[in-house]
Amino acid sequence: MAWDFSTDRDFQEKLDWVRDFVETEVEPLDLAFGDEHLVYDKKHPVHDEVLRPLQEKVRAQDLWACHLGPELGGKGYGQVKLALMNEILGRSGWAPSVFGCQAPDSGNAEIIAHYGTEAQKERYLEPLLEGRMCSCYSMTEPQAGADPQEFRCAARKDGDEWVIDGEKWFSSNLRFAEFAIVMAITNPDVPVYQGASMFLVPTDTPGIEIVRNVGVGWEGDGEGAHAYVRYQGVRVPAENLLGGEGQAFKIAQTRLGGGRLHHAMRTVGAVQRCFDSMCERVLSRTTQGELLAKKQMVQDGIAESWIQLLQFRLQVLHAAWTVDRVGGHAARTEIAGVKVATPRVYKDVVMRAIQLHGSLGISNEMPFSKMLLAAIVMGLADGPTEVHKVTIARAALKGYEPHEGLWPREHLPERRAAARERFAHLLEHEIGNQ
Ligand SMILES: Cc1cc2nc3c(=O)[nH]c(=O)nc-3n(C[C@H](O)[C@H](O)[C@H](O)COP(=O)(O)OP(=O)(O)OC[C@H]3O[C@@H](n4cnc5c(N)ncnc54)[C@H](O)[C@@H]3O)c2cc1C
């Protein structure tokens, strides 16, 4: 029997170190530098003065960039260990950067590692892995996100160069990035899934215009970090093509599968944080002469949250275990399942946390309203929930055949008749005894 829900003692010691380190050294960064965009602004002095020394401590513990295999300087721990670690990192907006696994750089690094030439790796991958550079992934367009068949941004070959023209939408962190990975159509005569390519585009290339930086939720005009960007006659050398021509979607899948799972792993930690806060609150607040924890409807919220968190955590760990066994591509249904569950569980638990904290819960003196927005984002970024449900349903239905005949296989009269025929001698005996 190989079913086991325990953690190796050696790795548990690492996890204990991570938890203590994140709580004492990293979470203060979230509190002191509330602007989460500073995480990506490598020019801000906090990077050299605080972040780098913290990153050194992480390296000294052999915990740097754990999403990467050993060939790229990671430890090759695999996804299950990464899940256990990411649960802790999910408590803090700065923690992934301290541990060298922040999105979107982590996914971008993975695809350059997989598909990049030696020269591309030297120029883009190494500084990205060392945390010296910030990158952007530029795929979604203003008129189309979930359906790439509507994409228009195109690149044409001109001598030894590619010329990119088009617009992109929600290109996160472009304003801090040294380069963007841009998806563009290079062959309009075939379906987009075979006719789009990826390019490495340095952000100081002439022709890149950020129309505006779009924010989410309550962010003010221009305060956001999701660029609406226009690429106008943007020229890059032929060697900036990433992978082969027409390979954009193959490359995108390499990136997005892992990224979705890593978001889910961190969400386990964020949901746990809501749950912890909720439990403490109901044990601390009195109403009508008794603790909130004594009210049955409050207990219902605690119990439902506990169940959802446990189910979600096990689902994420199972998906991670499946990726370790069969790889990300073969585990795409499990990853899609996790992608659908992530916003639902996060939203449900954070909503209960807000409700049970009352006005304080929705105030800007607690983290929950930001978390609620983050939960909603989880249902959109990296593809909307509906699209992932389609993936799951298609995969599930592949395992079935239509059932012949008028009645379904589970139709009880037919099944009962067959069963009665099998036990006819005993049934006759029973009837005879009556
Ligand atoms: C915070 C954040 C960061 C992001 N960062 C990046 C980034 O760095 N780079 C990047 O390229 N993109 C980024 N995105 C964009 C993201 O990938 C898109 O939002 C996503 O793919 C959906 O595209 P859309 O927003 O155009 O929605 P649409 O494609 O217009 O879809 C809108 C809605 O229509 C419904 N819908 C769509 N398709 C289907 C379907 N097949 N079946 C049923 N219903 C459907 C869903 O309800 C969906 O939410 C980011 C998004 C967010 C929110």
Image: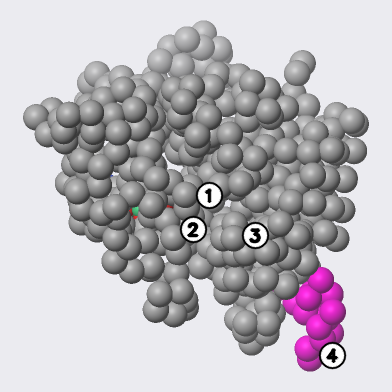
Q: Which mark is on residue 93?
A: 3
**Given the image, on which type of amino acid does mark 3 rest?**
Gly
| Element assignment for label 2 | helix
Task: Judge the density around disc 1: few (<14), some (14-19), many (≥20) Cα neighbours within 10 Å.
Answer: many
**x 45%, y 69%: residue:** 224
Observer able to see residue 317: no
Task: Please name the residue shown 39% across and 45% down the image.
Answer: 202
The amino acid pointed to by label 4 is: Gly
Give whichever of discs 1 and 2 has the lower sequence position. Answer: 1
Q: Position of residue 134 (x, y in %)?
A: 53, 49
Mark 4 touching mark 1, by CB under 8 A? no
As drawn, the label of residue 289 is: 4
Secondary structure under the numbered disc 4 in the rendered image:
loop
Marks 1,2: beta carbons within 8 A: yes
> What range of the chain is rendered magenta?
280-299
Measure the C-alpha gap from mark 4 to mark 1. Answer: 54 Å
Q: Position of residue 159 (x, y in %)?
A: 17, 29
Identify which residue is drawn at 62% across, 82% down.
364
Residue that sits furthest to the left in the current view = 189
**Residue under circle 2?**
176
Q: Nearer the viewer, mark 4 or mark 1?
A: 1
